[in-house]
Amino acid sequence: MTNKQKVSAYNVMYFTTVNIVLWLLYQMNLHIVVYNADFTYITFAIIGIFYLISLYVVIKSFLAKNSSEFDHYFKDLFTGLGLLGTIIGFVYAFGDLQNLDVSNVETTKEVIKNLLMSMQTAFFTTIAGIVCSLALTFQLIILDFNDPHEPFMILSESDHF
């Protein structure tokens, strides 16, 4: 098996694993939880973009191409979108606190409910951004092993135990 075939096989296995994980999360109805919790829907945008970029990396592995500097910007995009969702969630959370009237129980309940929903948006977008960024980093590392002049090894020959 050539180096190109190994890199392609590893990227296909990785992409298949991503599909299985997404399917399992779907079966656990996590998409409904995120839909109800993330009012910005940035989490779905992060996951959708990640899926397309992950497929793009698999295609690049079949074409025996290494990652480009442009590919690595997507890692930053996921982190940035996650941070954007966090900031939006915090802005909404702290914006509702000015409507807090502790003497009115109903108003206080509504403010706390909105505060919790805003915090869920912040946490879901942060988690999605970090996980997708790390997953793409791993996939780009696999893709960068696509050097036809070097043998495909995760560890160098001096790293034997």
Image (cartoon, rainbow, N blue to C red):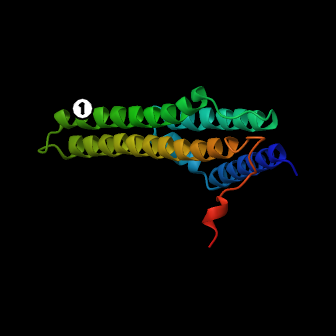
Looking at the image, residue 144 sits to the left or right of residue 126; the answer is right
Looking at the image, residue 88 sits to the left or right of residue 79; the answer is left
Mark 1 residue crowding within 10 angstroms, few (<14) / some (14–19) / many (20+): some
Which residue of the protein is positioned furthest toward the right in this rendering? 1
Looking at the image, residue 4 sits to the left or right of residue 126; the answer is right
| Residue 41 appears in view | no
In the rendered image, residue 61, in percent from the top left (x then y), is placed at: 76, 38
In the rendered image, residue 123, in percent from the top left (x then y), is placed at: 40, 46
The residue that appears at 67% across and 55% down in the rendered structure is: 24
Looking at the image, residue 8 sits to the left or right of residue 81; the answer is right
The residue that appears at 76% across and 42% down in the rendered structure is: 149
- Name the residue beneath numbered marker 1: 95
The residue that appears at 50% across and 31% down in the rendered structure is: 77
| Residue 125 appears in view | yes
The residue that appears at 71% across and 50% down in the rendered structure is: 14
Q: Indicate whether 40 appears above or below 147.
A: above
* Along the viewing direction, whichever of 62 and 82 lies nearer the viewer: 62
Q: Indicate whether 90 appears above or below 138.
A: above
Picture mark count: 1
Quarter of the figure with the C terminus:
bottom right
In the rendered image, residue 10, in percent from the top left (x then y), is placed at: 75, 50
Q: Which quarter of the figure has residue 71?
A: top right
Identify residue type, mark 1. Answer: Gly
The kind of secondary structure element at disc 1 is helix
* Along the viewing direction, whichever of 109 and 58 lies nearer the viewer: 58
Which residue of the protein is positioned furthest toward the front in this rendering? 158
Which residue of the protein is positioned furthest toward the left in this rendering? 103
In the rendered image, residue 42, in percent from the top left (x then y), is placed at: 49, 33
* Along the viewing direction, whichever of 138 and 84 lies nearer the viewer: 138
